Amino acid sequence: EVRLLESGGTLVQPGGSLRLSCAASGFTFGNYAMAWVRQAPGEGLEWVSSISATDGTTSYADSVKGRFTISRDNNKNKLFLQMNSLRVEDTAVYYCATYSASWHVPEFDYWGQGTLAIVSS
Amino acid sequence: QMTQSPSSLSASVGDRVTITCRASQNILTYLNWYQQKPGKAPKLLIDSVSNLQSGVPSRFSGSGSGTDFTLSISDLQPEDFATYYCQQSYTTSPITFGQGTRLEIK
């Protein structure tokens, strides 16, 4: 059974930093691209960032480019999101999600339960 | 950019409903649909316009190509009341979702 378990969400002040983690199990983690998708309270889904399976290719939404860094450890089956220079508008539930197949056709077939990051003074 | 309509919809059990998603450019058939229930993660329902994921009831169907797409649900069941999102998979970045359509019980 595929399982994705996010952690690291908490309350942080504007301008602060946070590191989210996603622990994966039940599949060959190193074979799949991964993504972070967020959802602000009462709002829709917003793609944040993606990372390829093995070659380290990354991509970011314009809203987080230069502030967030996605990474992964295929030996430990973990995905990370380093979030710096946080803004109030970054407040959201952050989901990690797996690409169902190819990096070139991004569709997300497994999702974690999400971790809530609150940016507030 | 993906634009869904309506943003909310009220219907009764047994009804048939249709949700529309319009892309700002031709995305061929790279269009997926997700269902999200309150407090839960999204669930992939349909990929590539009309390919139902395993376990998704056949009352769900998708159609379209290019810029205009629809998700239809026939014979609505209580468990279908949720928010639905379209998402384009034509571009690897940015990956864009529609703003969502909330389907409520009338």
Image (cartoon, rainbow, N blue to C red):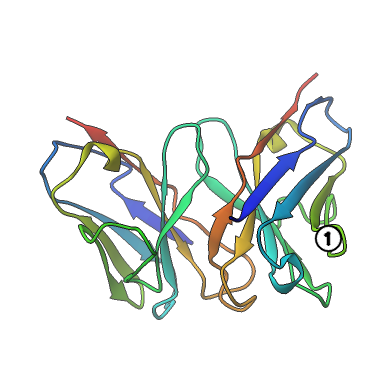
Whole-percent x, y for residue B96 in the image: 54, 60
Which residue appears at 20% of the width and 42% of the height? Answer: B77
- Tell whether A103 sits left or right of A72: left
Question: Could you say which quadrant of the image residue A72 lies in?
Answer: bottom right
Going by the numbered disc 1, the residue's amino acid type is: Arg
User: Please, is residue A69 above or below residue B94 in the view?
Assistant: above
- Tell whether A24 sits left or right of B12: right
Which residue appears at 26% of the width and 34% of the height? Answer: B104
| In the image, farthest residue toward the left | B14
Whole-percent x, y for residue A30 in the image: 77, 70
Mark 1 surroundings: few (<14), some (14-19) or many (≥20) residues within 10 A? many
- Tell whether A24 sits left or right of A14: left
Q: Mark 1 points at which residue?
A: A72
Task: Output the chain of dot 1.
Answer: A
Q: Can residue A10 be seen in this view?
A: yes
SS at badge 1: strand
Q: Quadrant of the N terminus of chain A?
A: bottom right
Decide which of B81, A69 is in the foreground and name it. B81
Decide which of B99, B105 is in the foreground and name it. B105
Whole-percent x, y for residue B69 in the image: 30, 67
Whole-percent x, y for residue B86 in the image: 41, 58
User: Please, is residue A101 above or below residue A1 in the view?
Assistant: below
User: Please, is residue B6 above or below residue B20 in the view?
Assistant: above
- Tell whether A2 sits left or right of B50: right
User: Please, is residue A4 above or below residue A120 in the view?
Assistant: below
Which residue appears at 23% of the width and 61% of the height? Answer: B58
Decide which of A98, A118 is in the foreground and name it. A98
Which residue appears at 40% of the width and 74% of the height? Answer: B48
Q: Can residue A61 be seen in this view?
A: no
